[in-house]
Image (cartoon, rainbow, N blue to C red):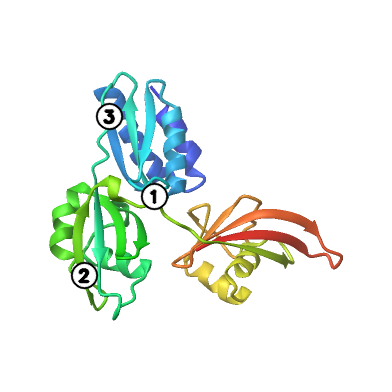
Amino acid sequence: MADREKILRYFRAGGDEELAAKLLDLAEGAHKSRKFRVSDFLDPHGCNVAEIVAANFENVKLETSGGFKNAERMKAAFVAEDFFGRPDFSMVCFKVEWDKRYYELSHRDILGAFMGMGCKRELLGDIIFIPEGAQFVADKSFAAYIMSNLTQIGSAPVSLTEITEADLLQKEEKVKVISATVAALRLDAVAAAGYGVSRSRMADEIKGQNVKVNWKEAKNAAQPVSEGDIISFRSRGRVEVAEIRGTTKKGRLSITLKRYI
């Protein structure tokens, strides 16, 4: 059996103790029942925590699924090695449609409508847009509630249809490569270059808790970033620090960023 306190102590410094404790409960439940236990939807950082937790159990393996083939938000299943069935991730898939001649809806609109019904973010997976509207994945236990209550998003009347996982389309992301120079590898400077806003604006957004680094809430504007880090700005997509190319003649740092829209 894994050393629970040792694992929690490892995550305590990074502020992930509460999440690690929940995932440990699931892993221990799978180990004792010799079956499986499934988490809520996790972001990529949460999935990394789940991988570390599972690695501390000799007889428990980890499987993940988010419905979409290239899902970002996924559920983690801790599965006992002597369980020979398939874990039930308890997900339901939906297509939502509206009249695009009169209404233009965003990811934020759909997420806001979902949470406005009293549902937690952890119960919703990815949302992708398709020509007819959008597709999303949610926790199966809320399927009936969602079908009954999600009748409007913003001012747009919507129709909701339950679909199969096979009907889910692969997410398509547009990538914009950005070459920039910054005075230092500070979060506010790098993020400002990636999102095309002023450094002071980005500092305010970081202070307002709208920015994450590697899916963890940013600490402050001066937080250092490194090659390979992922910066996310609420409702503005993700920016990857793809390459730190070196120092210019004027002493600034030359970087390459990839912005995923």
The location of residue 143, given as percent across then percent down, is: 17, 53
Foreground pick, 110 / 37: 110
* Quadrant hosting residue 60: top left
Dot 1 or dot 2: first in sequence order is 1
Mark 3: which amino acid? Arg
Dot 1 or dot 3: first in sequence order is 1
Observer-side mark, 1 or 3, equals 3
Q: Looking at the rendered structure, which numbered label has been put on residue 86?
A: 3
Residue 49 vertical position relative to residue 118 in the rendered view, above or below:
above
Dot 2 or dot 3: first in sequence order is 3
Query: Which secondary structure, mark 1?
Result: loop
* Quadrant hosting residue 136: bottom left
Mark 2: which amino acid? Val
Q: Looking at the rendered structure, which numbered label has been put on residue 158?
A: 2
Query: Which secondary structure, mark 3?
Result: loop
The location of residue 221, given as percent across then percent down, is: 60, 65
Foreground pick, 98 / 144: 98
Circle 1 residue: 73
Query: Which secondary structure, mark 2?
Result: loop
Q: Residues within 10 Å of mark 2 (few under 14, many from 20)?
A: some
Which residue is at a point 59% across and 52% down the rendered structure image? 229
